Image: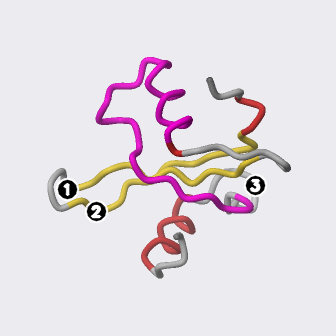
Amino acid sequence: MLKTQKIKEAAVIAIPDERWIERPLATVVVAEGCKVSKEELMDFLSENNFAKYQIPTEYVYISEVPKTSVGKFNKKEIRKLYSEGKLK
């Protein structure tokens, strides 16, 4: 079971998918000294009333979620990083 204290912050964007047109991609910031596997994240989300199609199958670990000038998650920046191939 995933302890939510392991995740500092996370944001999800839609990315292109050949079969479904688009699928969710989760960008995850893990708390210092912690490790979290893709399987742990998927299991955690499946236990919390998400439909199967809503659960990301792709996860990217980043050091910080980009933010706007007022501190909100900047999903435009995350999409730009993805399109530039900088999220691996």
Which quadrant of the rendered structure holds the N terminus?
top right
Please give the label number shown on residue 41.
none
Please give the label number shown on residue 21.
1
Q: CA distance from mark 3 to mark 1?
A: 32 Å
**In the image, what residue type sits under mark 3?**
Val
Q: Position of residue 37 (x, y in %)?
A: 58, 44
Q: Which residue is mark 3?
A: 70
**In the image, what residue type sits under mark 2?**
Pro
Closer to viewer: mark 3 or mark 1: 1
Any magenta on residue 58? yes
Crowding at dot 3, Cα within 10 Å, few <14 / some 14-19 / many 20+, comes out as few
Please give the label number shown on residue 16.
2
Residue that sits furthest to the bottom in the current view = 84
Query: 22 above or below 50?
Result: below
Residue drawn at (56%, 35%) of the image = 40
Q: Earlier in the sequence, mark 3 or mark 1?
A: 1
Residue that sits furthest to the right in the current view = 32
Q: Earlier in the sequence, mark 1 or mark 2?
A: 2
Magenta range is 39-64
User: CB atoms at circles 1 and 2 under 8 Å apart?
Assistant: yes
Residue 56 in the figure: left or right of residue 37 = left
Q: CA distance from mark 1 to mark 2?
A: 6 Å
**In the image, what residue type sits under mark 1?**
Ile
Residue 32 in the figure: left or right of residue 72 = right
Q: CA distance from mark 2 to mark 3?
A: 28 Å
Task: Place residue 56 in its image quadrant.
Answer: top left
Q: Position of residue 76 (x, y in %)?
A: 52, 65
Residue 33 in the figure: left or right of residue 87 = right
